[in-house]
Amino acid sequence: MTTTPRTVLITGTSSGIGLAAAVAAARAGWRTVATLRDTTRTDALRKAASDAGVELDIRQLDVTDEVSVAAAVDGVIGDYGRLDAVVNNAGAGHLGTLERDGIADVRKVMEVNFFGVLNVSKAALPHLRATGGRLITVTSVGGVIGQPFNEAYCAAKFAVEGYMESLAPVADTLGVSVSVVEPGAAATEFVNNIGIDLQAGIDAGPYSGALRRYIDRTVEQFREGSAQTPAAVAEAVMEALDADRPAFRIQTSDWARAFVATKLADPDGSAVQGLTAAWVA
């Protein structure tokens, strides 16, 4: 007896967590639609798939463009007739602080990290309802604990977490499971993609000293060997995809679980403030 493969669409698969999740899903038997904004950046993805001996359906999808999102989702339905899961992974970092950032910079971060997630999720939900599917979003421990010089990024991730936490019981009434995956530091291209040279001098005006201390700490945290690999984070994504009934909130490491627990057991905020203040003091 033949069965129709389950189909998953994953965003932001050109590198890092998205690439690792796409390969892991295909290896686990999912028909995997691996999407990315810039289709000239598929070399690493294709090589990883080839090395793993799996096939990926690679397509263009810009999460900030509703037309692009609709075309990608409609294309999957047209070709395969079903969509069983979505992994919202596409995102962009941003380093800055309110007095030095332009409001347009903050809006750009929200467009990618928050509204991009909503664009994809909204387009996918009718099809996930039809299959009793899963809506999974890679957020961050920064979606639970605000971090210095990450105001815009954490605000976007907080927004995603709040939206999905609110959506989850509503979607569940119609058979759709909603989960968020919260990585800590991961050895990916994410930090490089923030768009600044972390080792170079940065003019942050009166905040320069605090920013330098934060950068020194962050560079060390993200070094290979002291951060999770993308493959390790992808294991948590696969837990959300394959568990009989996945948790709403899934951390990707013991460190991430302990870090998030600081906030969840901190009703007056003093523990979090004491922790993060030490990063810049």
Image (cartoon, rainbow, N blue to C red):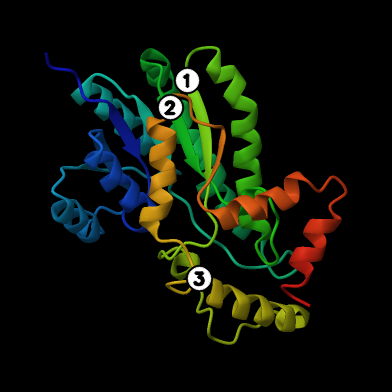
Q: Position of residue 172 (x, y in %)?
A: 54, 17
Q: CA distance from mark 1 to mark 2?
A: 6 Å
Kind of residue sitting beneath label 3: Phe
Q: Quadrant of residue 32?
A: top left
Residue 276 seen in this snapshot: yes
Amino acid type assigned to the residue bearing label 1 in the image: Val
Q: Amino acid at mark 2?
A: Arg
Residue 277 place in picture, x, y as percent: 78, 69
Residue 134: image tag: 2
| Sequence-earlier tag: 1 or 3 | 1
Q: Residues within 10 Å of mark 3 (few under 14, many from 20)?
A: some
Horizontal arrangement in the rendering, residue 133 relative to residue 45 (left or right)? right
Q: Is residue 71 left or right of residue 270?
A: left
- State the residue position of label 3: 222
Mark 1 and mark 3: Cα distance apart in space: 34 Å
Dot 1 crowding, Cα within 10 Å, few <14, some 14–19, many 20+: many
Whichever of callouts 1 and 2 sits on the residue coming sooner in the sequence is 2
Residue position marked by numbered label 1 in the rendering: 176
